[in-house]
Amino acid sequence: MYSGKEQLDQTFDDFSITLKPSPLSGRTNEELIYNRGAVFDNLLIRIAKFRVETVQKFESDVDRIKPFSFLSAAGDAIGHTSPYKLRFDALHCRGRLIVMEESSRMLGILEAFTDPSQHNLVMIEGMQRLLIREAKDHLADVKGLIAACEVKNLRRLEAETRLIQIMSYVLLRDQNVRADLDVDASFERILDLCGTYPDTAGQLRQTYHSVKGVYDEEQSTANLYTKGAQRVWWKWPRHHIGYLQYCPYGHPYSSARTNECPECGRHVPRNVDPNSHLREQDFLDAMKTFTFPSVYGQQHRQGQGQGQDRDHKEM
């Protein structure tokens, strides 16, 4: 998909000059636009087919044997959370986004014609309707995918999918269509994931800034599929027998290819703003009575408990 997106970018300028505003060019323009979009459509069909016929069946088989196969040396059940189908769902969503972005770029060429033919005007109206409908459907699908990622604790994939969601929102905004999405909250969540999981979701920090720039209209494009993301993808299937490991969330990975789970990785607790826990009236009451509110006491006890746990681990 990375090479396909790169090819679209490299050939766009040459393609744009083949579209003409004259009445005799209407049918030719339609064929050129259809053929350009069909290249990625065929890729999406292959991804969807592999997802259904291979990945989905594999996960179903794993779920059936899970009670008998995923056992520790002591015979205890090991939590197993398969991320593969959701990864292919996200890949398919990303491909759909690329198709929509390319449709928007081609639509921009037609709209820039100073004297478009009637055929081109009809094509512009049809492409706009199709783009808006597809972007709305895409947003709904991505929303469900994000919820599934949260349930399975797929931190990196959630960050990726939220970036896809925001770019879909931008497409609708460019068509003067409002979508129901709290973009600021989504950006905040992505940034939090990047900081908390720096070795996995944190690799998307540069992409985050790129998407933020598009949303703030400071730049025009943001490539969501990079060579770095491609390298992460290719770590999954390169497994060596005897090196299967599970992270605390039950995600399987090959320790021969990576030291930590490609979805979670190292966990770095975020710094807490002390002002967010400051209760002035509680403090004044405590100073008068020399007692502390239950909320503070609970936090204090939790802090002590965490300290004791650390002491125990160090021992």
Image (cartoon, helix red, strand yellow):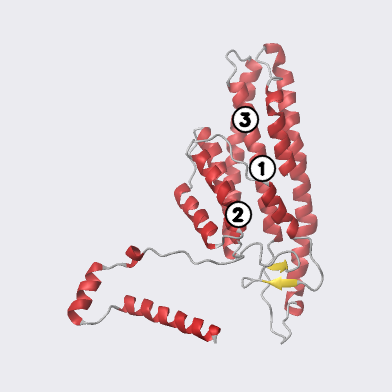
Distance in Å between CA atoms under marks 2 and 1: 23 Å
Q: Nearer the viewer, mark 1 or mark 3?
A: 3
Q: In this figure, which residue is indicated by the disc labeled 3?
A: 105
Residue 73: image location, x then y, percent: 74, 85
The tag earlier along the polypeptide, 2 or 1, is 1
Along the line of sight, which residue is nearer the eye, 266 or 81? 266
Question: Farthest residue in the right direction?
Answer: 241
- Vertical comparison of 296 with 58: above or below: below
Image quadrant of residue 247?
Answer: bottom right
Determine the secondary structure under disc 3. helix
Give percent across and percent down for residue 276: 34, 63
Query: Pointer 2: residues within 10 angstroms few (<14), some, or many (20+)?
Result: some
Marks 1,3: beta carbons within 8 A: no
Q: Residue 203 bears which disc, if any?
A: 2
Residue found 71% across the figure and 12% down from its top: 24
Q: Is residue 157 left or right of residue 212?
A: right
Residue underneath mark 1:
96
